[in-house]
Image (cartoon, coloured by chain):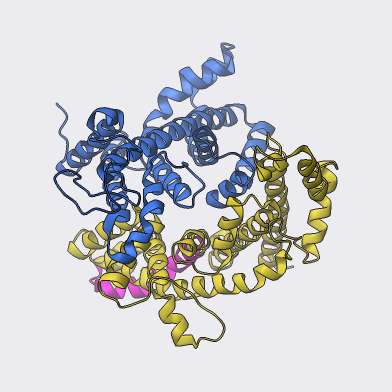
Chain colours: A blue, B yellow
Amino acid sequence: MIRIPPAALIGLFFTLLFFFCAVFAPLIAPYGMAEVVGDVWEPSSREFLLGTDSIGRDLLSRMIWGGRTTIFIATAATILSFFTGSVLGFFAAVSGGWVDQALSRFVDLIMSIPSLIFALVVLSVMPTTILTLIVLMGLLDSTRVYRLARAVAVDITVMDYVEAARLRGEKIGWIIFREILPNALSPLVAEVGLRFIFMVLFVSTLSFLGLGVQPPQADWGGIVKENKEGINYGIQAALYPAYAIAALCISINLVADWILGRTTSLKGGRG
Amino acid sequence: MHPIVTLVAQRLALGFLLLFAASILIFAGTTMLPGDVAQQILGQSATPQSLANLREELGLNEPALTRYFDWLSGVLQGDLGTALTNGRDIADSIGGRLKNTMFLAFWAALVSVPLAIFLGLLSVRYKDKWPDKLISAVTLTTISIPEFMIGYILIYWLAIKLRWFSSVALINDNMSLLEKLNSIAIPVIVLTLVVLAHMMRMTRAAILNVMQSAYIETAELKGMRMLKIIRTHAFPNAVAPIVNVVMINMAYLVVGVVVVEVVFAYPGMGQYLVDHVAKRDVPVVQACGLIFAAVYIGLNLVADIVSIVTNPRLRHPK
């Protein structure tokens, strides 16, 4: 039986709760995503638990649907980022030589421009669809995964069993997926949580700037944008997404810390 | 020639090469992507005639390489082109805004750097006791919320509920320094909170790294007081990594500025960029993107050079 520390348990509970709400949003949300059901910025009541938003939609429903969009985009982008980043990273480490040099310098180049600025530059000519956002965020972030994956894989490629596989004449795909991947998995898994948090913050920022998820589709960054005028009248509507994002990110951080601690203690301490 | 000079010169050359490559990337990002830029700018309802006119105006009929070098030679001469949306000279529009952005970033840096180092030292001094835990809990929270949301939370509490500051940060040249500072107080606090968390955590890690060295243990064993150990042994050795951390976070600050300016309707570069991305004004986006990339690369370059100069070990590569 694995003993889970209380902090990680709380984190795990809230993380699962958020994902549960995201998956079952259509069943949980009291109203439809873009359904106008009341007056503008009604205070919280039994009918509308969090009140209504800038055009009279139920805010709780918007938050639940918005969480679904935000979490979906962040999850998809994280998966893309890890797939691209780790495959290229392993490939560079196993190949070595000029392939490694070319890939690594290209990644250095992309990382020399801040991700947000790069995303803005690309979004100025690309249509802002959810697919564009996922691909853009996933590919930009894969540079960080690439560096980690390559660093881990470089240590593994010098092992005898990789050398043995090479001498057996195994193809590069076999070496990457059967020899490197299983041994590089734990440091990569620990990184997943942090990349996911980054994606949530990234997509929320883009939506807030009006360059991410487009209305009437709900998402947490967009809810802030839609309700920001209310703040001047002391209406909290725009602040709920901030609380939600903070709760989600802190929960994931708690879980990630625990996983990181476990995987490093398996190897007998950090480093 | 002195080895430091050679190394620094190498770094500088590398920085310029990187900036050149970044300019290619920014240009390619806006021109070689799938889809017709003219169509994107004008939307689906555009007539073929207006599309053809815009293509002509953007020079889209010429090969990309020619356009790139035209653009680059213009930029090198200080000519950033004209904005598509209002036909104004981009360099003129950017001038004052760049100054405003630097003003904001400067004050944020002035507050956050000393505070981050102080809190970093404090949390090392009281490692695993309540001050350390409190500081790391607060920084974990600020890292977990996007900048713009911290901005609105502070507007809600400081400007609306308590009425200490104004919720928009409008500044102009007629205001006195004090008025300007009052006006940018909340944006500065937001930027400070965002950068502070990263900077403080990295400072803490850098000092802890030094604290694990053998000479610190020796000092402890001979009975030196903790604060004195930090001051005389740990801090001098931690200066190089801390300066590095500060520079990296200044680069981070430059990006944070973009979002914070939009929140507070502050007339700076970031808002200019975001506005024109939404309007699909490609020349403005290219110019702003290049400037942000240049500042970012420049600050990282300074961080590199500082660590070479202050760390003798880096001067003698194996």
**Res B92 seen here:** yes
Q: For residue A23, what is the image quadrant? A: top left
Which residue shows up at 50% across the image and 64% down it?
B250
Query: Does residue B24 appear to the left or right of A256 in the view shown?
Result: right
Q: Looking at the picture, does residue B136 appear above or below residue B93?
A: above
Q: Main secondary structure of the magenta part?
A: helix
- Residue A204, percent across and down? 42, 47
Q: Is residue A196 left or right of residue B47?
A: left
Magenta stretch encompasses residue A11: no
- Disc tally is 0
In the image, the segment drawn in magenta is B221-248
Viewport quadrant of the N terminus of chain B: bottom right
Res B317 seen here? no
Near-viewer residue (B165 or B181): B165
| Residue B71 image point, x, y percent | 79, 54
Q: Which picture quadrant has residue A74?
A: top left
A2 or B83: nearer the eye? B83
Q: Which residue is painted at 61% across and 52% down in the image?
A: B279
Task: Please give the name of the residue rendered at 27% of the width and 68% of the height, measured from the top-left corner.
Answer: B157
- Residue B228 lies in the magenta stretch: yes
Please tell me which residue lies in front, B37 or A132. Answer: B37
Q: From the top left corner, tell me how far across and down residue B76 is, in percent.
A: 79, 62
Q: Residue at x 30, y 43 (%)?
A: A63
- Residue A233 screen position, x and y as percent: 30, 65
Left or right of A62? Residue B109 is right
